Image (cartoon, rainbow, N blue to C red):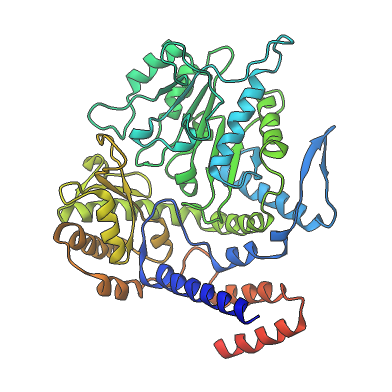
Amino acid sequence: MSSLLKKVQQLSDKILVNNAWRQKECFNLIPSETTPSILVKMCEISDPSGRYAEHKSMKGKEVYFYQGIDAIKEIEDQAEEELKRYFNCENVELRPISGQMANEVVFKAMVRFINRGRPQGQPRRKMRLVMNNDLNLGGHLSSQPFGALFNYVRENPETGKEHVINFPVDKDNPYKPDPEKLEELLNEHKPELMVFGKSMFIYPEPVAQLSRLVQDWDPPPVIMFDMAHVLGLYGAFQSPLEEGAHVVTGSTHKTFFGPQRGLVAGNFPKGSPLRKLWIDIKGRAFPGSTSNHHLGTLVGLLMSAFEMNEFKEEYREKVRTNAKNFARSLKDKGIQVEGDESDGFTETHQVLIRINQYGNGMDIARRLEENNIVTNYQALPDDETFLEPSGIRMGVQEMTRFGMEEKDFDVLSGYIADVVIHNKRVKDEVKKFRNHFLKMRYCLEPEKAVPLAAQIFRSLFHDPDFEETFAKNFKSQE
């Protein structure tokens, strides 16, 4: 036990140091992360985290294959309803455990769907043609042939590569689409699936325009929007399902308030020509891609959906306002900001800066981290390789939730300029500044949340000695 205690103590010390640094001493500006509320975290470690609740639609009835999961079933049903309310949609599938898995579920379902009604003995194993965003222009890896799209699209006999074409971009601004070229490409290639969404994401996608262009196609193509980065901005940044998209996917832990999971949402009413696609999506979610779908984070997702539906209007507008002001402040302090200045540089939570005149993006990102400003390096559209990135990608969502306003991002932009341009050491000042932003917003107040969180935590103890020890320690911490 002495050996075990030593190992446990060493790991505990590392956890405590990392928690203090990430939560209290540095500014997290990575656009694909957020800190869940204390109640969401407690949900994640509650009893369902060790349970199974496999289920499948069979002969019009949802059949569960485990006992003891009535509460879990109720939670999953409630989470579906909360997210239907969030998206204002009819269908939600929550079993994917990541945004990338959600995309793969749809790709698998597409292959199954295009085989419905085929002549017997003539299966199609892959989609004929897919349209997506170029990885070098901000497209996410999950919709690339080497990512989740792997092995689900045919090879182009002329090139020997997967038959994928990219959405065209404006020649003067590679972060914006080219509407005229889009129409030309659609008419020429007739893709079966179009996948919107990016990881370097500052402007809206042309969903409504594309929907109009393909509305008379027979059979209808499927329009998909991977909203992983902007799921928490749904309705303020874009509303793809209202604009003509059939399917929305995403991860629930970037701009959304949730734990790390994925989802698929859409409108597939009975009688719709794509109704059977939804049936295939559900079948590829289970048993196609998951067995246990991480029930602890499912409970956390429901809690985060409560928070998001309560605070979404205020939160998402504040995020976008902060991003625009952050970009403007960085520009004013001498840093080159990507995007169109007349549009405020960004319409999402992301801010992109070009820093190659001061060094390699990897080195600049490390230098910022050493000064308690956590970002990630980013290859920009004109970079030849990801190994020599010219950019830094930042997001304001997490620090907005910790209470930062426009004026605060102006101060932070000054510290960033000091590090990037002047190679100054500002770690102590940054650490001190972070002390002003430790209270999380857009969730229950601490006086209401902490007693509930403590109750959940205490309920996990089945050994009376643990419960007694916890009670004593909790009392001393107060």
Q: Name the quadrant containing residue 180.
A: top left
From the viewer's perspective, is residue 367 above or below residue 447?
Answer: above
From the viewer's perspective, is residue 443 above or below residue 74?
Answer: below
From the viewer's perspective, is residue 33 above or below residue 415?
Answer: above
- In the picture, measured across the screen, residue 298 lies left or right of residue 16, that is right
- In the picture, measured across the screen, residue 353 lies left or right of residue 114, that is left
Residue at the location (37% across, 14% down)?
184
Asked whether residue 355 appears in the rendered view, the answer is yes
Residue 332: give x, y in percent of width and height.
Answer: 16, 54
Residue at the location (24% across, 65% down)?
411
Residue 264: give x, y in percent of width and height.
Answer: 60, 39
Q: Residue furthest front?
A: 3
Q: Nearer the viewer, residue 427 or 6?
A: 6
- In the picture, measured across the screen, residue 249 lies left or right of residue 275, that is left
Q: Name the quadrant containing residue 285.
A: top right
Q: Nearer the viewer, residue 294 or 70?
A: 294
Asked whether residue 235 appears in the rendered view, the answer is no
Residue 168: give x, y in percent of width and height.
Answer: 34, 24
What is the total number of numbered labels drawn onto the structure image? 0
